[in-house]
Image (tube, helix red, strand yellow):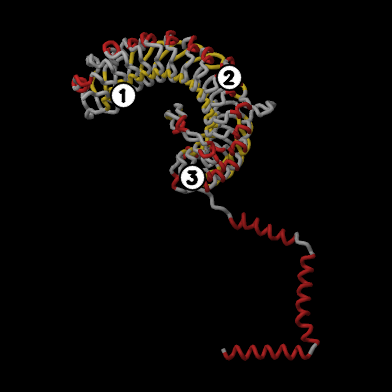
Amino acid sequence: MVLSTIWSYLPKGSESKEVILSLHSEISHLTHFNLSHNSLYGSLDHIQLPLSLNRLEVLDWSYNAFSGSIPSYICLHSSPLIWLLDFSFNNFNGSISPGLGKCSKLRVFRAGYSNLTGLLPEDIYNATTSLEENELPSNSIYGAISDKIVNLTALNTFDLSYNHFSLVLPPSLGKLSKLKFLVLDSNNLEGPLPPSLMNCTKLVEIRIGANSLEGDISTFNFSKLSQLSKLDLAVNLLTGTVPRSLYSCKSLKAIRLGENDLEGLIQPEIISLTSLSFLSFSFNKRQLTNVTGAVKGPIPSWLGTLPRLHSILLASNQISGGFPKELCRLPMLVHGRAAGQVDRNQLELPIFVKPEDGDTIQYSSLSLFSPMIDLSNNNMSGSIPSEIGQMQFLSKWHLSFNNFSGDIPHQISNLKNLKVLDLFNNHLSGKIPASLTFLNLLGIFNVSYNNLEGPITTSIQFQSFSAYAFEGNPKLCGALLQKECQPRKVIDGDEKGKNQDVENAYQNQNPWSYISIVLGFITGFWGVSGPLMLKKTWRNAYFQYLDNAKNKCKNI
């Protein structure tokens, strides 16, 4: 029998030497060698593939527990036809050995999530002009990204995210005309973002967040990037204003530019981004404007017209004004996914959130990220609109460290998906609506340091919240705060007020009402009694009727 494919046929937990020694002469025609998704283990450092594998095209040993280094002999002594090498999700504790450059047909090289260390071999940039995917995320590889990357003219996916790459990005990066996915999140890159990147007109994703890149972003012209769907430059040292050309990228689904030193205005052109689902400008020096550009500060009302927007993160900026009622009409938060028909599973964008307990949570994609509005730590004021009750798909709502005043609207109890309600440090007054106890998913609640009053509801859910969530409100009371609520003086207070209202009502009645009562009485009396007094036959008939009625009652 001649084998052309080996597909995960070995027992779980086999040792790597076992795997290789089990190969025999019948595999000389083997083209696909797939051992993925097993529990194979052992070092690959001293294992040699049989020289008879001269027709091998695909080698997939991903999702195992192999250790050591990625072997270079695969390209040095085996088939010149190999076009895919996949070592993802293993336990390598070594480096990528030199020699991959000898795989002249290599199109796909994957080794992410495999505990690799060391430098990225220079010869990989000389490998071939046919290399299309180079994916090495979540390892410990370090060093610089070589200028020789421009040799990889067919490259469309370059993912070195979550490693330790440093120094500057190659200025000639823009020569990679076929590049679609540039993913370099969470490294130690520094220096300017290459302006030549705007020449990569096929870019779908630019994700270079969590580095130390610098430069004026307003000088970039995004107008050529018509296919761009995700832009993540957050947590860098970028300056300037958001260029208007960014809003010409009609395919944008996610924009994250937070934690930079950006300033200026979000232009009304953003409403043309009808696919936008995620917008983050948190921790910047930002000001917002309305359509006319005459008023600086308030959140523009037209932001509520974006049909697929479900997450707005604008924390720690210079936003002023009130919470616009129009924002409460966001279709994705009012009607859910059906409103925007957006496939959130396609929005793979790592998101880091630091909740109230101080621990950082990472969401691997927007499909796992709950719909959220975060406007905390700004200068917003006014009352919270009752229209907020329309946003029934909202999950997290942060308004802390602002100047909101007035009552907490009871319509918030309509937000059945709400998990976080953060109203900490405002000027809210009145009572905490008892209807909030209907929010069964509410796990984080904070109304501390406001001007609230009255008893804290004794529901089991509210009693599970920490006392810190209510402190700083001198007029709040209840067991949770170990502060007894004073009984209400019903007679002296409320009842007295009610009696006074009734008394005033009588005093203010029109005198014609009394006259009409008297006239009605006179008319009714004489309408019945008058004929009986004046006409004898009617009087006799009437009294005879009464006698008959009395006799019937006696016989019953």
Label 2–label 3 contact, CB within 8 A: no
Report how far apart the C-alphas of labels 3 and 1 lie in the structure. Answer: 44 Å
In primary-sequence order, the first of circles 1 and 2 is 1
Question: As rendered, which of 428 and 143 lies closer to the eye?
Answer: 143
In primary-sequence order, the first of circles 2 and 3 is 2
Q: Residue at x 70, y 91 (%)?
A: 544
Q: Position of residue 339 (x, y in %)?
A: 54, 39
Report how far apart the C-alphas of labels 1 and 2 lie in the structure. Answer: 39 Å
Report how far apart the C-alphas of labels 2 and 3 lie in the structure. Answer: 45 Å
Mark 2 falls on what kind of element? helix
Q: Position of residue 196 (x, y in %)?
A: 52, 12
Q: Position of residue 314 (x, y in %)?
A: 55, 28
Residue 211 in view in this figure: yes
Q: Residue at x 44, y 47 (%)?
A: 460
Quadrant in which the N terminus appears: top left
The residue under label 2 is 223
The residue under label 3 is 439
Residue 47 in view in this figure: no
Mark 1 falls on what kind of element? loop
Q: Residue 123 vs residue 196: left or right?
A: left
- Residue type, numbered disc 1: Ser
Q: On residue 62, which mark appears?
A: 1
Mark 3 falls on what kind of element? loop
In primary-sequence order, the first of circles 3 and 1 is 1
- Residue type, numbered disc 3: Leu
Q: Residue at x 44, y 26 (%)?
A: 350
Q: Quadrant of residue 128?
A: top left
Task: Give the class, few, some or many, for how many residues have Cα within 10 Å of label 3's Cα (few <14, many ≥20).
Answer: some
